[in-house]
Image: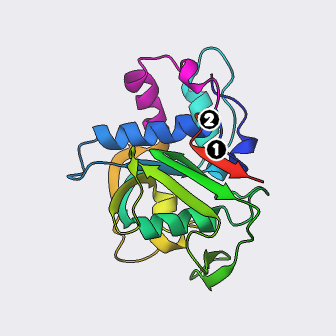
Amino acid sequence: MVSVPQASELKETNLGDFFTDAYLWQARNAHVSKAPIDCALVNGGGIRASLAPGKITRGDILTITHFKNQGCFVTLTGAELLEMLEAATSITPEPLGGFPQVAGIVYTINTKVPFTKGRQYSNSQYYAPLKHGERVTIKSVGNKPFALDKKYTLATSEFIANGGDAYGVLNQQSHNKTLLGYTEEQVLINYIKEGLHGVIGQQYAKPQDRITILQ
């Protein structure tokens, strides 16, 4: 069961888990990456509606996606991934459209520690953290211990890959995105039809403990 989206800008939600699982599944099944796809991320503000119990239509999917993003993947270092999570949770527990819903990543935000601004991202209102790892700790990526110097392949939307919201670290030529060949709408529909065999089951009845928030 997938439910109310508004909380997706504040904390992990079952709808956020569903969204990111869809991206991860589609990226792994699109056969466009030579490297394994380690993880997936979507911005909570990009989840625009809820899915009610019962039959889900294409119209329901169009309502929750709204922006018609293209799915894609990028490769980045562990240090860059940590910077992304720090910047996109800079005001947590207050809501932020860029809040990172994730698949294949387990992380903790310590809101008792204030966010310290570093450089401002170009053409953005958001800032990188002055010091990586002050508020966010990544436990694992792809079910393996996290490492700052390791390279990871991330499935996400084209909006995020272009440095949208607080993801300015990706707005660099070194982060060339590769399109999956599917819009976000298609990603979700394909996941429901093929990945879940037409049924969004009990695995999405509640959040799956990917994100811990210390307050």
Magenta-drawn segment: 185-207
Q: Give the number of the mark in front: 1 or 2.
A: 2
13 relative position to 137: left or right: right
Q: Main secondary structure of the magenta part?
A: helix
What quarter of the picture does the C terminus occupy? Answer: bottom right
Classify residue 113 by image quadrant.
Answer: bottom right
Please tell me whether residue 153 is drawn above or below residue 190 in the rendered image. below
Quick check: can you spot residue 69?
no
The residue drawn where x is 29% and y is 37% is 29
Q: Which sits in the foreground, 123 or 75?
A: 75
Mark 1 and mark 2: Cα distance apart in space? 8 Å
What's under tag 2, amino acid-wise? Answer: Leu
Residue furthest left as drawn: 34
The residue drawn where x is 62% and y is 22% is 1
Residue that mark 1 sits on: 47
Residue 175 pos. (x, y %): 36, 70
Secondary element at image label 1: loop
- Residue 15 is tagged as 2
Secondary element at image label 2: helix
What's under tag 1, amino acid-wise? Answer: Ile
Residue 95 pos. (x, y %): 76, 55
Please tell me whether residue 129 is drawn above or below residue 183 in the rendered image. below
Q: Is residue 10 magenta?
A: no
Residue furthest bottom as drawn: 119
Q: How many marks?
A: 2
